[in-house]
Image (cartoon, coloured by chain):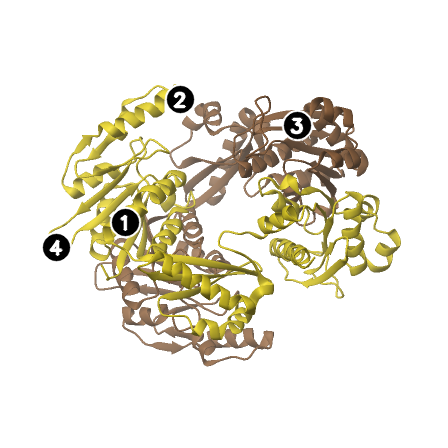
Chain colours: A yellow, B brown
Amino acid sequence: MTNTIRAEVVTIGDEILFGQITDTNTQWISTELTNIGIRTVRKSSVGDQAEAILAILHEAHQRADVIILTGGLGPTKDDITKKTLCDYFGVGLVRNEEALALVTGFFEKRGRPMTDLNRGQADLPANAVYIQNDWGTAPGMWFEHDRGDDRGRVYVSLPGVPFEMKNLMTHRILPRLQAYFQTPVIKHKIIRTVGIGESFLAERIADWEDSLPPHIRLAYLPSFGQVKLRLTATGQDSAQLDRELAALVDEVMPLIQQNVFGFDDDELESVVGRLLKSKNQTLSIAESCTGGFVSAQITKVPGSSAYFWGSVVSYSNAIKSSQLGVKPETLAQYGAVSEETIRQMAEGVRKTLGTDVGIATSGIAGPDGGTPDKPVGTIWIACATAQRTVTRLLKLGQYRDQNIQLTSTYLLNLLREELVNQ
Amino acid sequence: MTNTIRAEVVTIGDEILFGQITDTNTQWISTELTNIGIRTVRKSSVGDQAEAILAILHEAHQRADVIILTGGLGPTKDDITKKTLCDYFGVGLVRNEEALALVTGFFEKRGRPMTDLNRGQADLPANAVYIQNDWGTAPGMWFEHDRGDDRGRVYVSLPGVPFEMKNLMTHRILPRLQAYFQTPVIKHKIIRTVGIGESFLAERIADWEDSLPPHIRLAYLPSFGQVKLRLTATGQDSAQLDRELAALVDEVMPLIQQNVFGFDDDELESVVGRLLKSKNQTLSIAESCTGGFVSAQITKVPGSSAYFWGSVVSYSNAIKSSQLGVKPETLAQYGAVSEETIRQMAEGVRKTLGTDVGIATSGIAGPDGGTPDKPVGTIWIACATAQRTVTRLLKLGQYRDQNIQLTSTYLLNLLREELVNQ
């Protein structure tokens, strides 16, 4: 099939419609559909009313080839998706023995009593293909339906619990959609950069970008101090696409090498973790204006205790001196936000906690505390190793949250550079 | 007007449709609409194509009284919302002098050159009411439109940048909607609880909940270790509703006093901050399994340097001894995850950093490191003051992120209780 396959993603539930819970499902689903070459043309949310659900089914049939519904499959009475699907397709509910066995097993395993409501979860519209849900009690459903016009449509109904929905999509629905629609092979490669703005990056790789063949597209995805370059290749031959993407990465890398910290799912904190591990080095952190945020990023990574020994969060100047050995006369002469202080903080934490590397932050995160000399956003970072100590001055903005987050990103990147260049 | 006012919230933009960015606007908007008594009946996302935007306008007109559009108002060519609104309403674009002055001022202030594209941002459909945007260059627009059927509709078009959209909604659009539709007065009161599950809470206040008058509704809003109780009162007299809500809070408080940490926008970290400040006490933190997360929560609060002096993140046992004074024989005999160790950590950080209060965490956040005796999720917390040291054992789950977040919540709550009971 060479035409574009169009999708509509529909969430069902009053709690989403009224803003009581955050809908993360639709973004995830449309990203996954994009990844297999299916184009989302509309996203919709409707409430738990039969007429609202019927209306969206009729509308979606007009504009989409595949309609993905999430939500409205719980055992309680206000969840009426299944009954409404029966009305829409003109069929009745039929108990599915496979589904019943799964629900029964689920309750037996947990030693919990089962009610008629629970048993009802095994009732499916007669035309449904049963899609086994190994992660919960509500089954997935797949329908192929022709309303008398020239072509059939695929309807997929999934539970709204994100964990169950994602597993069902990944393991059961996406492969089935690829097979049914014979979608092209889509391959992605993400290059992760840090410390260079989107427009500068675009300028630097303009010639390379212009040379991309039509079946390979490039997207810039910016976030706090980082830009992801995502290459998307469309074709028929998976191995061939992989080779093309690898060649393009090889071509562009010399232009941006110094700003690339990883690929695909890499995060800065896991990349520096791998570097420390491979070099058999240990890390300590002295944090002032970031208040523990950098340490929390480092320890988000499972297994970080292999290379991270500890931190001192020195919000008060007294602790900068007593715990990190910053000289009181340095603080008096240059202040806590100064190159002299940050150097002593990084070297001090490295020495006091006895690690190979010490990194540090000190600055004015805001909203208060700025002066004409050192406005809010003035932040020093440093990295001390056995070889040398490097310091950097950041001039950030006025928002506390953003300043903390950006400082963390730039400090982890400084650490990465020092480890790579050792 | 006594009928329900129905709203459709529409986001415009390929980047949302394809899942490249997270849409936080629609949830925020529908929550705010609910708060003024307007019922969202549909949420939709469409791409940056004229035909898709025209289609949703025609559809939304059928089912809603007010249609809120966000996105598609930037200066670049792919943002075509304004042109499409002209087609829909059958009018032309007219330059708005007020809007032009604002855009011009914006560029002058920043010393940046202005292009025709920027000037074009001041062009509005002829039937638009200009809504001044003090937070960016794209103006807001308000339309009252009758398509020849029995009643007019309100269309609102806002920029998609969340910061600009929220300010425009809060200060300009919501008051205007309330006046136009003469919506009833809606008042909210939120009671914030911690350390009690939703079902236990519901049981404890069942009689009180049953006694609520029909014009006051209760919602349970749970998140990591906390449950918000939200009372929503609907009526005509603002002062009267405030009095009724205050009386209901007075009634329920004796039943849940020990679990209530605040009201409305209060967060645990700001509540303990206020308590420390009012008691003129200082805080230090010793973190093991939370790795800096608790300190980062405390320092999220602007002005926290008034009471927070610092932390020691002691991931390694060596640092627990060298920096916090935990006895090596305690670590050898009981291990790092034990009541004996957590007590010495809290007392040690309090003494070493010289603060009035010291709090501490030590446990197994996972996914690795569990033993049959101490499975993943086994976590000790403690709070040491001049009067006494209190320890608590938490038995949490298997997910690292959740364990860190829940430990932080329970530790801040323990600190709160100790400060309140002093």
Chain identity of mark 4? A
Q: Are marks 4 and 3 on the same chain?
A: no
- The kind of residue on which mark 1 rests is Leu
Q: Earlier in the sequence, mark 4 or mark 2?
A: 2
Instruction: Tell me: A373 left or right of B361.
Output: right
Of badges 1 and 2, nearer the viewer stands: 1
Residue at which label 3 appears: B337
Residue at which label 1 appears: A177
Chain identity of mark 1? A
- The kind of residue on which mark 3 rests is Val
Separation of marks 4 and 3 at Cα, in angstroms: 67 Å
Q: Callout 2 environment at 10 Å: few (<14), some (14 to 19), or many (20+)?
A: few
Q: Position of residue B216 (x, y in %)?
A: 42, 36
Give A145 or B372, whichever is nearer the viewer.
Answer: B372
Residue at which label 4 appears: A149
Chain identity of mark 2? A
Give A95 or A354, whichever is nearer the viewer.
Answer: A354
Q: Position of residue B265 (x, y in %)?
A: 56, 43
Secondary structure beneath dot 3 equals loop
